[in-house]
Amino acid sequence: MREKQKHIDAFDYFYQLGGAASKENCRLVAEKFQISERTFWNWYKKLGWKERVHLRNIDVGKRVEEKTNTTIADNKANYLSYVHKLFNDWKAKVDAGEVPVEIKSVSDVDKIVKLALLLQDEATDKTETKIQSEGKYEVTERIICSQEHIDHEVGVLRAAGKSQGCNKR
């Protein structure tokens, strides 16, 4: 059967109704396009409407996913631009000596070191994972930043604090 515009329009209407092969959808399409219910079922089978509904659902799902991914990426970029602006404004005030940078506790050092590590895509915490393979082997994986790296970051922070005239305890 060769598909004509009337078939395409009928399929589009059928799809808008939900694309389910039901007596109600058959009746509604037949009524709107002035065809018999038997003709509807012939079109449904010969023109592969079941498969077309499935393919269109996949296509619609892909388009929704792409739109969602684009929206999420745009939002992240927008939020990141605000964070950069806030940070740059704050940094300008620190550089001008308007805002003091003080490290008052070990907790402050820990937070700053972890932030520096995160910005460098380094691990900030120790994690242990035990993996057992077929009951024969046990492997322990450890991820931890080195003491040398932590000492380096603390040194950088101290030097930055001195250049800003911050008091140390």
Image (cartoon, rainbow, N blue to C red):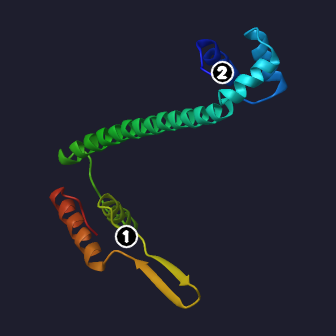
Quadrant of image for the C terminus? bottom left
Question: Of 52 and 123, which appears nearest the observer?
Answer: 52
- Left or right relative to 152: residue 22: right
Residue reaching furthest to the top:
34
| Residue 37 locus on image (x, y percent) | 81, 18
Is disc 2 placed on a helix, strand or loop? helix
Please tell me whether residue 165 is drawn above or below residue 80 in the rendered image.
Answer: below
Side of 67 relative to 145 (left or right): right
Counting residues from the N terminus, which is met first, the one under dot 2 or under dot 1?
2
* Residue reaching furthest to the right: 23
- Amino acid at pointer 2: Phe
Q: Which mark's residue is nearer the viewer, 2 or 1?
A: 2
Q: Type of residue at label 1?
A: Val
The reply to whether residue 18 is visible in this rendering is no
Res. 168 visible in picture: yes
- The residue at the point 51 percent across, 33 percent down is 63
18 is higher (above) or lower (below) than 79 = above
Q: Which label is found at residue 106?
A: 1
Q: Is residue 151 left or right of residue 105?
A: left
Label 1 crowding class (10 Å Cα cut-off): few <14, some 14-19, many 20+?
few
> Which quarter of the picture shows residue 114?
bottom left
Dot 1: element: helix
**Residue at figure coordinates x 64%, y 31% from the top left:** 53
Query: Quadrant location of residue 50?
Result: top right
Residue nearest the observer in this picture, 104 or 95 = 95
Residue at 37 percent across and 70 percent down: it is 106
151 in relation to 156, above or below: below
